[in-house]
Amino acid sequence: MATRTHYRACNLCEAICGLVIEADGDRILSIRGDREDPLSRGHICPKAVALQDIQNDPDRLKRPMRRQGKEWQEISWNEAFDQTAQGLKGVQERHGRDSVAVYAGNPTVHSYGSLLYGPAFVRTLGTRSRFSATSVDQLPHQFVAHQMFGHQLLLPIPDLDRTDFLLILGANPLASNGSLMTAPDVKKRLQAIRRSDGEIVVVDPRRTETAKLANHHFFIRPGADALFLAALLHTLFTEGLTDLGHLEAHTAGLDSLQDWVSAFPPQRVAGATGIDAEDIRQLAQRFAAADSAACYGRLGVSVHEFGSLCQWLITALNLVTGNLDSRGGAMFTLPAVDLVGAGRSRGHYGRWSSRVRDLPEFAGELPVAVLAEEMLTEGPGQIKALVTSAGNPVLSTPNGRQLEGALEGLEFMVSVDLYLNETTRHADLILPPTPPLERDHYDLAFHALSIRNTAKYSPPLFEPAEDARHDWQIFYALQQRLENKVSPLTRVRRHFLERRGPSTLLDHALRRGPRGSGFRPFGKGLTLKRLKEQVHGVDFGFLEPCLPQRLATKSRKIELAPEVLLKDRDRLGDFLEARSTSPQSEQGPFLLIGRRQVRSNNSWMHNYPRLMRGKARCTLLIHPQDAENLGLGGGESAKVTSRTGSIVVPVEVSDEVMPGVVSLPHGWGHSRPETRLQVASKRPGASLNDITDEHRVDPLCGNAALTGVPVDIERMPQAGAVRTPLTEPPRQQSGTETISG
């Protein structure tokens, strides 16, 4: 067979880099960056090259698996679909519709077939017990967008290629290639800001790869970001540096915001944040004076107890300096498939709450921090069954050991997943979809988060096996078996959807979108056929101002002072008082933060040889002075203990972290038994989420607070150092209904 050249977008992270893949039959010869891709411009990171490892992974499941005790056996797809439907129906008949829970993991958003067909399956179940990785990630962004702009997906994106001043909090785009900011080749983009005499400032408890490239880096104590942001805004108001520009007439609540931040002057928050008051004032002045500026905060300021306040104050900072919806500031996309303009998925808040802890739903989902307790606490509505889709919550959600114990007590569990991993090993059935290179692809989410308006369609490179199923086919088959009464019209629609698949829905969305042709026979706009012809993708140019036209609030104004956020000032004030009166001691408790790595996006990246090369990356970063105080040396092992348990990890001594802070990367912990992850199990690491705390959440939206976790550090005797992670059961709790697993 002749060599083929295949163009596609990488779907292993948010950067969606364009690829050129050379293949000979079913063998990949090379993977390189596509220089003609308008967004990535030839850039790729190591993850893209690992696409071939997924395709050829001997551990990847290819047929449905049924658990028989501790053994697994292959079964047919019809058997698997029938048994799944019977199991789910049986649990709901015995315990009610909410007794079946659904969890969607991070990779779900990287498959447009799953995004288009998965929700219909969930609606058929009719359950309110819905969870996803959203509430251990970007939920505060969506919550604040819903409160301020009326739509959860109207998310401001830094205009990275045109800004003069970039302020970054809790983000490391050099490791992530952008996050909620699709920006491949971000290093060159940041270097271009520096070359044009622009300024980059990073505020982070660790001197990250991005911080090393910046003009300035400020250490900040974990969890204190909202205080810092409030002090910036306080300075702008007191020094008369606010100017809302073209949005002044379209903004409500400016006076309320000014009153809110008046409680947090720089001199009051300096001690709690670790940043001098004068530095805060000067930073606010430089931000306001820049011709264009953008403040961008990501995971590090989302996954703590004030994540919603942080995202609100970041947006407010951009707005009151005239940098929201303005060139070089924080802008909004107008993608070819416009999820905002379609009028759906606006979001809703607090229509129901979790049964045990009374945390609110957002957009139909409950916070995943309550998942285990909803399984373990008896009573009406107790979760008795679980469906997971492309997720590994045992390693990716707080107090994974507790969740692990809860999974063992379920009556039924099914997983749509490629692997027998730390979570799916508890399932009764595993339904494996096709891998990325065997299905077509369009980035519904990440084109909507990009620093440029672009579009790109990726056809499949390889034909799937005859007995393989795409994820959308799995969800559709299950939906059919779960539906009770079906009208003739529904039967026709089913036949259409089953035969044509998600590409037909994509074509309709493109035609209806702002770049589309509509359904006119000779329309000149975008269609799927025309997009397929542009193998490198289509560039629609820079982001453009779009407010107030795209606002979805009832007032048709930006709500700068939502009541739910204003009410949270006392809690932030209490936090400030506690930090001011009880400074951290020299030897603990320490505050634990996460760490992003290019080769380790999530737990599902750890079974690919090309990504696991090099030195061990699951290490505990600790400041030299703290290490000396504890008698710790590099390469030795330390025991890290929180309220929920302990792990043992190798130590890496580094002044990258500020004193009193330790850092551990996310997604490791591959030492659980009965998994099939040959590569990952050889370098298992320890799970950060064995010691994160499910009780630490942002109470406004329920997002898990995974950073700033108080921990104790203890040197392990050298003779007893271990190569695989050691775990201990959680400490005994009091005053809680949660049962420890």
Image (spheres, rainbow, N blue to C red):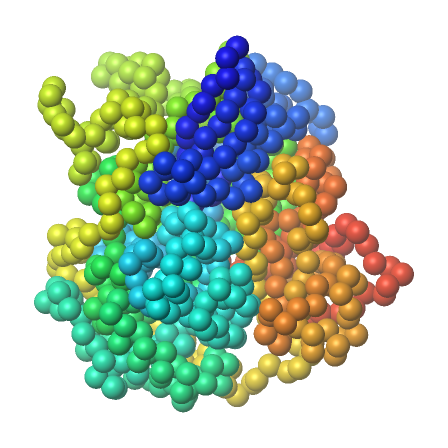
- Residue 569 vertical placement versus 553 (above, below): below
Q: Residue at x 38, y 59 (%)?
A: 192
How many labels sit on residues? Answer: 0
Residue 59 at what x, y percent from top left?
65, 28
- Residue 358 vertical placement versus 87 (above, below): below
Q: Residue at x 32, y 55 (%)?
A: 161
Q: Nearer the viewer, residue 297 or 669?
A: 297
Residue 694 at what x, y percent from top left?
55, 58
- Residue 75 vertical placement versus 720 (above, below): above
Q: Nearer the viewer, residue 83 or 190?
A: 190
Locate residue 467 relative to residue 144 in the image: left or right.
Answer: right
Q: Nearer the viewer, residue 689 or 542?
A: 542
Residue 175 at what x, y percent from top left?
51, 54
Residue 416 at what x, y percent from top left?
52, 30
Q: Residue at x 15, y 65 (%)?
A: 247
Q: Nearer the viewer, residue 14 or 252?
A: 14
Q: Quadrant of residue 309?
A: bottom left
Q: Residue at x 23, y 41 (%)?
A: 540
Residue pushed farthest right? 719
Locate residue 50 relative to residue 162 in the image: left or right.
Answer: right
Residue pushed farthest front? 195
Could you tell me if residue 734 is visible in this image? no
- Residue 23 vertical placement versus 568 (above, below): above
Q: Quadrant of residue 338?
A: top left
Could you tell me if residue 483 is visible in this image? yes
